[in-house]
Amino acid sequence: MSKIGIIGGSGLYNIDGIESLKEVSVSTPFGWPSSSFILGTLQGREVVFLPRHGKKHTIPPGRINYRANIFAMKKLGVSKIISVSACGSLREELKPLDFVIADQFVDRTNYAREMSFFTEGIVAHIEFSHPVCSFLSSKIYDAGNSLGFAMHPKGIYLNMEGPAFSTLAESNLYRSWGMDIIGMTNFAEAKLAREAEICYATLASITDYDCWHPEHDSVTVDLIIRNLNKNTENAKKILAKLINNIHNQEECPQCSSALRFAIVTDKNNISKKAKKDLNIIIGKYVR
C-alpha cells in the first residue's frame, strides 16, 4: 500500500487519531534529508511526516537538501506528497488565515539549489507546464471547504530566495506580474516530486500580507506567530479529513508516469552510477 507524505513544520504529526508513531532515518545518494521521518497510521492509511527545516527549524530555505528529502520519500514508498507551507499574501482578497491551493509557480531563487535528480550520467526533461497534481489539489480543497475554512482553489506561488523577505519594490513588482502568494520552498519540492513520479500539491497557509500592504508596518512578529500556530492547527484538521477521503487505488497518470517519455539518454549510455543511484526512480524504464 502506498503512503502519503506530508512536508511541513514540526508538530504536524500530532494529528488526532494518528497511531503507531515511529521515527526512522533514511540515507540517500544525495546526502541526508532535513530530519528523520515520523511514520504513523491515520484512518488505516500509512503517513510519512518530514519537517523541511529540521526538527528545531535550523535549516534555512536555501540550504534545505530538497533532493534528499524527496528521494527519501520515494524510498519510503510515498506516492502522494502534501506540502504544508506558510506564505505571504500578494492580494487583498487572500487574507491572513486563508488557505491557497497553489496551482502554478514562478521561481526567483538564485539557482544554487539542486532541483533535479538528473545532473550526472543521465538526462531527462519532465513536462512541467502544470507543476502540481490537479487530483490531489482538488481533494485538499474539498477537505478544507467541507470544514468551513476559507479556501482558494488556485493561486500563483512566487518562490523567492530568502531568507530575507522582499523589498517593497520587489513586492510591488511581483503584484504587477499577477503573483498571488509568496514563499521560499515549494518550487524545488514540486519539480523533484514530478521527477520522482510522486503526486505533489501545496496547502499554503497565509500568515500575513507581504510588505506591499499599507498596514504591513503594524504587523507584529507576535501576530504572525499566532497566525502560524492557528494555521497549523487548521491544517491538521484538513489533513485528517483529506486522508480519510483519499483512496489507495486512486492514481494520477500525469504524475505516476512523468518519466515515461522524459529520459533522452539511451539506456546503454546511462552511467552505472546513475542507474544504481536512481534505480527506485528510473528502474521501471531502464533495465
Image (spheres, helix red, strand yellow):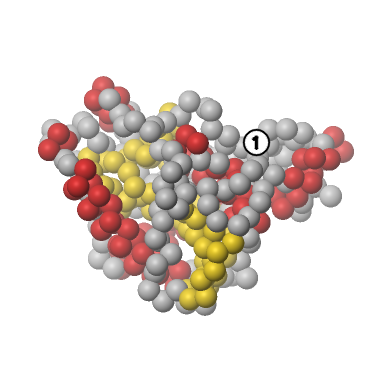
Q: Residue at x 50, y 55 (%)?
A: 50
Element at label 1: loop
Q: Count of labels shown?
A: 1
Question: What residue type is disc 1 on?
Answer: His
Rendered location of residue 215, percent (x, y): 12, 36
Q: Residue at x 36, y 64 (%)?
A: 236
Q: Residue furthest right?
A: 268
* Quadrant where the N terminus is found in the figure: bottom right
Rendered location of residue 105, percent (x, y): 43, 38
Rendered location of residue 120, percent (x, y): 73, 33
229 left or right, relative to 67: left
- Disc 1 marks which residue? 125
Rendered location of residue 169, percent (x, y): 26, 22
Q: Residue at x 54, y 32 (%)?
A: 113
Q: Residue furthest top?
A: 169
| Quadrant of the rendered image containing residue 65 | top right
Q: Is residue 153 visible?
A: yes
Q: Is residue 194 above or below residue 25?
A: above
| Quadrant of the rendered image containing residue 117 | top right
Q: Is residue 260 visible?
A: no
158 left or right, relative to 150: right
4 left or right, relative to 143: right
In-front residue for pair 16/159? 16
Q: Is residue 214 above or below residue 50?
A: above
Q: Residue at x 67, y 48 (%)?
A: 28
Question: Alpha-carbon neighbours of circle 1 within 10 Å: few (<14), some, or many (≥20)?
Answer: some
